[in-house]
Amino acid sequence: KGKDAGVLAELKSDALAKSDDVSDGLFHVFGSDSSAASEPARRSAVLRHTHHITSLAGYMRPGPSEWAGKSPPMIGVFRRAILPGKSEALAKSFKSVCDIWCATVPGILAAMVAPDPKDDNYVYDIRIFADKASYDGHVDKTNADLVRAMDVWFSHYDTSIPHRGAMFGTAEDTSDPAMHSSSVKDRPIKVDFNIFHYGKGGCMGRCCLD
């Protein structure tokens, strides 16, 4: 049924209240193929606004994942401000970071940066880590090439504006205070994002890497 009706059309629930707010039902689809999300049959009455956003840079490792069933992944989706006119420079510098991550940290399953469809001065950062060790590896201070590449990448963000979004993981994985500080120590950032723990505090559903 999902194949015929479209995945988005299956996102229905009596728990989802109807609203006159035009911003409700906004659904972002991140990837590289815009055709899958643009077909009318794939839209849902609940999801009134579907934006398919092609990433500026990044990667996603092909599945099925060797990490499936080992531990719940850590997933982060953040909306961050960038300096005016720095979108291309951000993408170029982030590609350099991703090349290092992809080669040295196999547990970084996905890392992408995508433009905000409504505001050129914002981007979405998407990360999927197989486990906490993989998260720690993405800021490996012993890797001089990574430190330099991240410093250039971070220089294109507007760190005066808090970045918002959500991080999903287990309570043990997300208890690290470092998650609320900068990955590049001499470039302090302001953070204002939510952390959700699988199966706790009203966080419903499940995450499967199969």
Image (cartoon, rainbow, N blue to C red):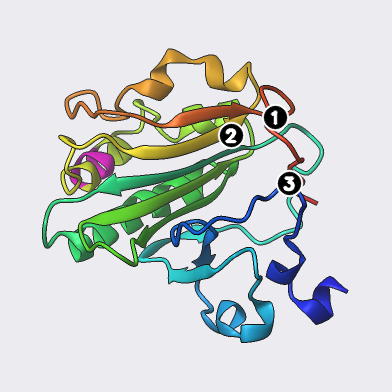
Judging by the rendered image, the residue that carries numbered circle 2 is: 168
Q: Looking at the image, is 190 positioned above or below residue 154?
A: above
**Pointer 2 with pointer 1, Cβ within 8 A:** yes
Magenta stretch secondary structure, dominant: helix
Going from the N terminus, do you reach mark 2 or mark 3 first?
3
- Residue 11 against residue 164 in the figure, above or below: below
Disc 1 residue type (three-letter): Tyr
Marks 2 and 1, how far apart in space? 7 Å
* Earlier residue among tags 3 and 1: 3
- For marks 2 and 3, give the one nearer the viewer: 3
Q: Is 144 in the magenta? A: no
- Residue 45: image location, x then y, percent: 65, 70
Q: Earlier in the sequence, mark 2 or mark 1?
A: 2
Q: Is residue 202 left or right of residue 184?
A: right
The amino acid at mark 2 is: Phe
Res 138 quadrant in image: top left
Instruction: Name the amino acid, label 3.
Output: Ala
Estimate the spatial distance between the alpha carbons at disc 3 and disc 1, rounded to whole Å: 19 Å
Q: Residues within 10 Å of mark 3 (few under 14, many from 20)?
A: few
| Badge nearest the viewer, 3 or 1 | 3
Do residues under tags 3 and 1 come within 8 Å of each other at their CB atoms?
no
Which residue sits at x=29%, y=34%? 144
Q: Nearer the viewer, residue 205 or 133?
A: 205
Judge left or right: residue 7 versus residue 139.
right
Residue at the farthest front position? 20
Identify residue for label 1.
198
Depth order, front residue of 118/128: 118
Q: CA distance from mark 2 to mark 3?
A: 21 Å
Q: Position of residue 10 (x, y in %)?
A: 77, 66
**What residue is pinned by disc 3?**
15
Q: Magenta part of the protein: which range?
A: 148-152
Instruction: Report how many numbered discs are placed on residues in the image.
Output: 3
